[in-house]
Image: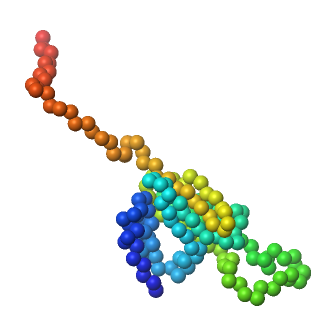
Amino acid sequence: MRQYDLSPLYRSTVGFDRLFNMLDQASDASAGYPPYNIERTGEHDYRITVAVAGFAEADLSIESREHALTIRGSRETQAAKEPVGQPARREVLHQGIAARSFERRFQLADHVQVIGASLEHGLLHVDLVREIPEAQKPRQIPISRAAAAPRIVETPKAA
């Protein structure tokens, strides 16, 4: 079993802290398929790129629910597409390109939203953005000079 030290990644990413914790805990042998990259494309922008060679748009589904992003892929085998009773037109002598179904899950940090996905040259790109609500953003508090004399506020006298 391979052990990866992901601690250097904790310092350079924002928004995927729980994702790296889950990767640390994962010990599933099928976790390597399909391979993927997580990139930081801007201050609050991220991109997940999944290698899905041989899969068409119709074979893939992307679902975002609460704090989880799920990417699924399944495609029919060539044998299932052949008409019944017809001889096979092609014979595969070596099959190195995986055609198996997969499901890849990513745990998203708070306020990370999926903004789009595209499929080009066998790579599925899922774009994410971290949108922090205005109420939770840090704000600057101006420091004013203290007045020479304290202000006295008079309260109305009770009659």
Residue 157 percent across, percent down from the top left: 12, 14
Residue 146 percent across, percent down from the top left: 15, 31
Q: Nearer the viewer, residue 72 or 114?
A: 114
In percent of the image, x 75 and y 76: which residue is there?
77
Residue 99 percent across, percent down from the top left: 69, 77
Point out the residue furthest to the top here. 159
Point out the residue furthest to the right here. 86
Residue 123 percent across, percent down from the top left: 63, 66
- The answer to whether residue 155 is above or below residue 128 is above
Please indicate, yes or no, whether residue 127 appears anywhere in the rendered image: yes
The quadrant in which the C terminus is found is: top left
Quadrant of the rendered structure where residue 74 is? bottom right
In percent of the image, x 71 and y 84: which residue is there?
95
Coloring applied to the structure: rainbow
Q: Relative to 7, is 152 on the left or the right?
A: left
Please indicate, yes or no, whether residue 66 appears anywhere in the rendered image: no
- The answer to whether residue 147 is above or below residue 6 is above
In percent of the image, x 37 and y 71: which residue is there?
7
Point out the residue furthest to the bottom here. 93
- The answer to whether residue 153 is above or below residue 116 is above
Number of marks in the rendered image: 0
In percent of the image, x 66 and y 63: which residue is there?
120
